[in-house]
Amino acid sequence: MQGKHLLSGLVAATLAVGMTPSVNAAPAATTPAANASSAYNQPPKEILDVMRAPSPPTPSLSPTRDKLMLVTMEEYPTIAKVATPYMRLAGVRVEPGNHSQHDTPGGYGIPPCVSAIDLVQVADGKQIKVKLPAGACPRRPAWSADGQRFAFENITNEAVELWVGDAKTGAIRQIKGVRLNQMFGDQLQWMPDQKTLLVKLVSAQKAPPPAAAGSDGPGIQESLGATGQSSTYENRDTLRNRQDEALFTYYGTSQLALVDAASGKITPVGKPGLYEELDVAPDGRHAVVSEIRPPFSYVTTFDRFPKQIDLWDLSQRGAGGANPVVRQIAALPLADRVPNRGVPVGPRNFSWRPTEAATLVWAEALDGGNPNVQALDRDKLMMLKAPFKADPVEITAPSSATPA
């Protein structure tokens, strides 16, 4: 019986820790008077000390294998962070104040902040502590391929900032004028020259569209009578009406830009759009750009919305504000009837051959994307080489085996 009371006390204390206003705040006194004036009950100091003890750092070896980055994460977000207002827009939970994602890509909890970064020289073990800005909430840093620099996002109440660090000295600095848009991911990546970053910037738009319930008419959904399977989603996270569509477009619109890590110079590329995935070729000039296009669906999330897949020439920047499109790869329709464990039809899974300057490879389903259909081959692999004038060629031989 005594063991049962002890276990109940520990469970209650642990739950109380998860409700503390701040994981960095000093433990509140446990006197009745203090508890009466506090919104949250605090467990004993001994339990708080255990729960708040920093986790072991996660090592990240530089691509050149001569430096080691030790990244320490905060285990528990503050109550203020958990309670930050956010919008549910087609599978993305975005904080309107700074355009940051309120949840992780898998939808599990609040993204953790980095509490400490230490750089270690592999040769002699010399360690340098990176001095993070006061009150910072950095994300995990990303090494440049030459191991000379690292970059990370810092979340503030007003913006998602871009910071760049020197791997030799540990000195970091903010790139002024950069407000990253985290809504669809891929908002920050090193270019092959290791001196430039390709980023998604918050588009310079006016204020968000005001709510005008009912003024634009009823919400209308149409059923075409077709049958098929589709994944299920949390209904509260899908779009519901035209106002949600307007908010989705407003918060999702980004301006692509190249940022010089040394000088901080920002060079816009193309025009603003709902850009999702970005993949740069080894030549540092060409990129596959996936752009979300209307009409939007009210029953599925943004990753199944119609998309335009284009090849861009980043060196052209886009004359007259136009997108520097070299070639259109595909216009993908709404994929709201993808079977369970199936894939959408059309080109998908784009990647560049790492051994060539600009050779694009992708897959296309041969079975309609349905794993329940018998087929000799499930996919074919296609290849397209620069200068992207010829037709893509298939690089997989047809199978002569029994249908799977």
Image: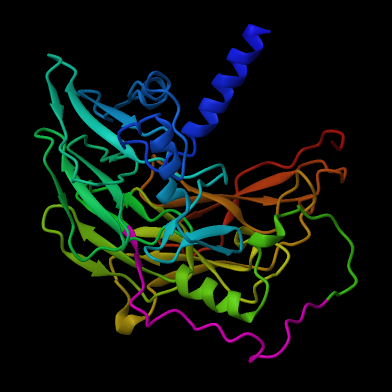
Q: How many marks?
A: 0
Considering depth in this image, is 49 or 371 the residue closer to the camera?
A: 49
Position of residue 207 in the picture relative to residue 368 (left or right): left
Compared with residue 152, is residue 309 higher up or lower down, i.e. above or below? below
Q: Residue at x 23, y 48 (%)?
A: 193
Considering depth in this image, is 32 or 256 the residue closer to the camera?
A: 32
| Residue 200 sits inside the magenta stretch | yes
Considering depth in this image, is 323 or 265 the residue closer to the camera?
A: 265
Q: Residue at x 62, y 57 (%)?
A: 347
Q: Which residues are magenta?
A: 199-222
Image coordinates of residue 293 in percent, x first then y, are: 57, 73
Position of residue 8 in the picture relative to residue 86 (left or right): right
Image coordinates of residue 64 in percent, x first then y, are: 24, 28
Compared with residue 373, is residue 16 higher up or lower down, i.e. above or below? above
Q: Residue at x 85, y 74 (%)?
A: 223
| Residue 2 sits inside the magenta stretch | no
Which quadrant, please, contains the N terminus?
top right
Compared with residue 29, is residue 295 higher up or lower down, i.e. above or below? below
Image coordinates of residue 318 in percent, x first then y, are: 32, 76
Q: Quadrant of residue 172?
A: top left
Q: Residue at x 88, y 43 (%)?
A: 374
Which quadrant, please, contains the C terminus?
top right
Image coordinates of residue 333 in percent, x first then y, are: 68, 68
Judged by its main secondary structure, the magenta piece is loop
